[in-house]
Image: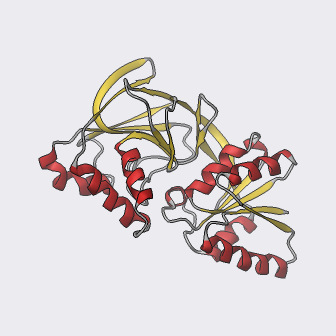
Amino acid sequence: MYDIIVNSASKKGLKAAKKISRELSRRKIEYEFHYTSYPKHAKVLAGELAAAGKKNIIGIGGDGTFHEIVNGIQNLSEVNLGFIPLGSGNDFAKTAKLPKNNLKKALKIILDGNIKKIDYIQFANGTRSLNAAGTGMDVDVLNKAYAFRRLKGFPNYLWSLLRVLKNFEPYYLTVETDGQKKTYECMIVCVANGIFIGGGMKVSPFSDLSDGKLNLVVVHNVPRKLYRKYLPKFLTGKHIGLFAEQFLVDKVKVTSDKTMRAQLDGEIYNDFNFDCHVVKSGINMFSA
């Protein structure tokens, strides 16, 4: 039995649901669709399904839908999660090697029934992150991207990044991990489980979903005259060791003398307590 949560705001998701229905019916496999009807409804649906003892919960949508599902389920270790990526960014899917916008292959992975245990990021306030959590310029970029809908996916994020860089002022963020505390003049502090943010920007090129560690990436402030030289390196994951540092950690706390804004899997949180740790092998995910 598969319980499938569909992001009703996505035309691709609704079309996919019809195709999945035909295929599962043809195979005489039991299933039930659960359609979102308001923002954050996927979180509520996932929580209700898990509380009712449902074991195979599938999400159709993008990073935002998957973020909601992971945050809605209290007993994550007791369910199997499947992700059918049909979003504009699909950053988590890239790291997890899930077929993007390929319904047939994505459904096959789920029906084959192979389970892989992966980590997730747990915050002290109860919020979880599946892919990556960050603060600094990445939040500014997302705000621009969400306000500009004429472009989709990576082109929108890139356009938004270029707009933000025009008037960028560095952030001063204090990072505490493994008993060490240091304040950085930086562009981004990212705690990553996955590799990509922003529709394909390789912020944490060495991340592994199942290594039991978080990748802390600090992108230092770059002089404006070097933007043209360094931007391609950031997009392709060649910034580590050049103008960014990476640390393998179990827990991280980030603070600022200003109100903390953060993005978790592309969802923006204001006045956020950025205090997190890794939960090792906390999610059972359908995987190839």
Residue 89, above or below 267: below
Q: Quadrant of residue 255?
A: top left
Q: Between 253 and 10, which is closer to the camera in this rendering?
A: 10
The residue at 48%/28% (across/down) is 252
In the picture provided, is 11 more to the left or to the right than 217? right
Most extreme residue toward the top, as rendered? 179
In the picture provided, is 86 more to the left or to the right than 184? right
Q: Tell me the quadrant of the picture where the C terminus can be found.
A: bottom right
Task: Give x and y (percent) for residue 74.
Answer: 75, 39
The answer to whether residue 286 of the structure is visible from this angle is yes
Q: In which quarter of the image is residue 245?
A: top left
Task: Give x and y (percent) for residue 70.
Answer: 66, 47
Task: Give x and y (percent) for residue 39.
Answer: 64, 54
Residue 186, above or below 258: below
In the picture provided, is 252 more to the left or to the right than 169? right
In the picture provided, is 137 more to the left or to the right than 33? left
The residue at 87%/48% (across/down) is 53
Q: Which color mode does the image show?
A: secondary structure
Q: Between 243 and 142, which is closer to the camera in this rendering?
A: 142
The residue at 56%/72% (across/down) is 101
How many labels sit on residues? 0
The residue at 83%/67% (across/down) is 31
Q: Between 44 and 181, which is closer to the camera in this rendering?
A: 44
Task: Give x and y (percent) for residue 143.
Answer: 41, 51
